[in-house]
Amino acid sequence: MSGQQELDHVGRIMAQWAVERPDVDVSPQGIIGRLHRLAIQLDEELRPVFAAAGLSDGDFDVLAALRRSGAPYELSPGQIAETTMVTSGAVTKRLDRLEGAGLVSRRTSAADGRGRRVRLTERGRTLVDDVFEKHMANEHLLLASFSDLERSRLAHLLEAWGRALGA
Amino acid sequence: MSGQQELDHVGRIMAQWAVERPDVDVSPQGIIGRLHRLAIQLDEELRPVFAAAGLSDGDFDVLAALRRSGAPYELSPGQIAETTMVTSGAVTKRLDRLEGAGLVSRRTSAADGRGRRVRLTERGRTLVDDVFEKHMANEHLLLASFSDLERSRLAHLLEAWGRALGA
DNA sequence: AGATAATATCTTCCGAGTCAGATATATTCC
DNA sequence: GGAATATATCTGACTCGGAAGATATTATCT
């Protein structure tokens, strides 16, 4: 028979299922199970960079959204909720924290009394610019094992998948 | 110049950064950013199957770990923590819930008085077998947009990455 | 204009996980 | 064998986000 393969964790899980539930095709785990575990591992690797700046990853997400929107670094809570994939309640709390830390300011929208305008403060902009550089350097390291071709293939596969799932 | 590309969400984010921080190479976001968003989207698609059985995804993870370990469907909390990638505290709480629902039982290990043995009850085994089939059918659907070649490539890339990050 | 519906944000309550430390039992080393 | 250390699990305080509903404002329809 075939030689002894060194299985990764998900590979071992799939092998267990093949014994216990041979009637079920568990091949999707080879992708979805691995993606799920990678997301956890990557979070664990990325979080320390944010934590060093006193930020949670969710809070950094908000600052980054404001920063990349360009001057005057201002968005509505609703726009922030959409781009960060969390509920409006989560955004409110993130903004409470960030406002308390002096990194963003909130005021009522001139155009729409229901809306708010959230703006990066000068301290906020300085901080996010600094943390963003470190964050990207960190992400580069996490991809160090891939060749250019592999990176390109992976990026395209993930993009196509997201599209298919209906972003 | 090149024609108008329809960008996905992460593509738009990267384009914004290219304007705001042209000095920073944000290409890792093409992979890590997309993977992060996909993990969230997939969770949202997978959760309803568990919820229909009155389970959180974390609780299902525990039942699945026990089930695939084979008869007598018994593991220690430590083993469960390792395979599910959560802390021992989280496992304790998951077991509290599952035990309360009559899906697992807990007793002191005969071999080691510090340890516990967690075992699937008959109801637990029946439930997880049922939910697992639906879960896998669901995962198949989520991969429907890929060809066999794409699936194979994606699985291999993710496996290699997990290995490189040091599972 | 007034009533009704829609929208944007915030509030409250709750569920789920982490972290640090507590507890109980095992192991090691003299 | 006893002290010191290591290990397995549990506990309690805390954080973060989700869900549903409250509030305030705006849009629509007659």
Image (spheres, coloured by chain):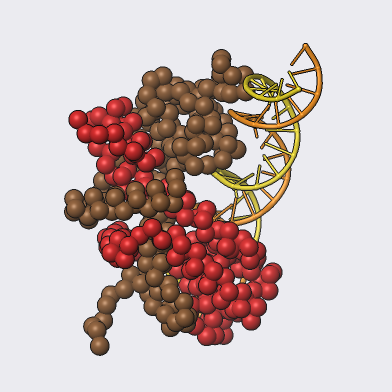
Chain colours: A brown, B red, C orange, D yellow
**Relative to B164, is B15 above or below?**
above
**Marker count (numbered):** 0
Left-right relation of A141 to A87? left
Q: In the depicted view, which residue is nearer to us: B97 or A53?
A: B97
Q: Quadrant of residue B23?
A: top left
Reply above or below: A94 against B167: above
Residue A54 percent coordinates (x, y): 44, 37
Looking at the rendered image, the quarter that the N terminus of chain A falls into is bottom left
From the viewer's perspective, tell me whether residue B90 is left or right of residue A151.
right
Q: Tell me which corner region of the image, top left, top right, bottom left or bottom right, holds residue B119.
A: bottom right
Front residue of A88/D16: it is A88
Q: Residue furthest bottom?
A: A1
Could you tell me if residue A62 is visible in this image?
yes
Residue at (58% x, 58% y) in the render: B48
Res A107 quadrant in image: top right
Location of residue B27 in the rendering, given as x and y in whole percent from the top left corner: 27, 42
Which residue appears at 41% of the width and 61% of the height? Answer: B144
Residue A130: tell me if it is visible: no
Instruction: Identify the residue shown where x is 52% and y is 53%.
Output: B44
Instruction: Examine the rendered structure and indicate whether residue D5 appears above or below residue B4.
Output: below
Tell me the quadrant of the picture where the C terminus of chain A can be found: top left
x then y, percent, for residue A123: 41, 23
Q: Which residue is drawn at 25% across and 53% down?
A: A153
Q: Residue C30: x, y in percent? A: 38, 77
